[in-house]
Every structure is written in structure tokens, then in C-alpha cells.
Image: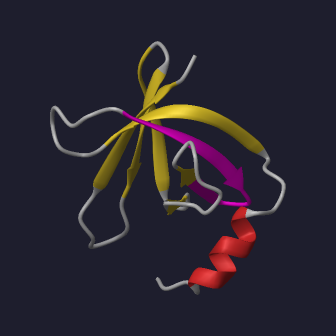
Amino acid sequence: MRYNEKELQALSRQPAEMAAELGMRGPKKGSVLKRRLVKLVVNFLFYFRTDEAEPVGALLLERCRVIREEPGTFSITTSSCGEASSSTGMKYGR
């Protein structure tokens, strides 16, 4: 699925349904925990570096599953019919 970058940036500036600071870990085992500001707008989860206004990226939250890993942590797993599955782990920032 393709999206226009300018449209996504404009959407990321809309009021958030939810927002928080999270620790975000990539899919590789042992990857570094990165601090990110995240913002849920409609069905996109935008993530930002803590010192920047433009989003670093966005996750489209369709056909996904959110799984609680342990207290304060969860992972988002996405898959579509016939496609490989991917996972992103996140930890609540407190």
C-alpha cells in the first residue's frame, strides 16, 4: 500500500487520540531500545524522535494484533493473507 508523504505528514499534525513516550525495540533480537514519542491518529501510529516535529515513520494499524509481553511492554504483530509476518516490540516510558 502506498501513501503520499505530504498527506501523512499533514495527518501526523492532527490532534492525537492518544499520545505517549515509548521505548521502541526493532525486530532483531538484542536491538537497542530507542525513546520515541508516539501519537495515534485515526488508524496510524506515528513515531517521532524526541526532539523533532516531523514523524520518523508510521505504522498502519490494520490487520494487526497487539500482545502484552510482560507488565509495561507489548508487541504489535502484523500480517496479511499470503504475506510474511512482522513484529515491533515497544515498552511504555515512565
Q: In this view, does 93 lie to the left or right of 73?
A: right
In magenta, the rendered stretch is 34-46
Of all residues shown, which one is farthest toward the top? 71
Q: Which of 20 and 63 is in front in this view?
A: 20
Q: Which of 11 and 75 is in front in this view?
A: 11
Q: Nearer the viewer, residue 10 or 91?
A: 10
Of all residues shown, which one is farthest toward the front? 51
Residue drawn 74% across and 41% down?
A: 18
Q: Compared with residue 37, is residue 43 higher up or lower down, i.e. above or below?
A: below
Residue drawn 78% across and 50% down?
A: 16
Total marks drawn?
0
Of all residues shown, which one is farthest toward the right? 15
Of all residues shown, which one is farthest toward the left? 29
Residue drawn 46% across and 45% down?
A: 65
Q: In which quarter of the image is the C terminus?
A: top right
Q: In this view, does 55 lie to the left or right of 40?
A: left
Residue drawn 81% across and 62% down?
A: 14
Q: Main secondary structure of the magenta part?
A: strand
Q: In this view, does 36 lie to the left or right of 14?
A: left
Give yes or no for residue 29 being in the magenta stretch: no
Residue 83 rendering spot, x and y as whole percentages: 27, 70
Give yes or no for residue 44 being in the magenta stretch: yes
Query: How was the colour assigned to the protein in this rendering?
Result: secondary structure
Q: Which of 55 and 75 is in front in this view?
A: 55
Residue 79 rendering spot, x and y as whole percentages: 36, 61
Residue 50 rendering spot, x and y as whole percentages: 56, 42
Residue 57 rendering spot, x and y as whole percentages: 49, 62
Q: Compared with residue 70, is residue 81 higher up or lower down, i.e. above or below?
A: below
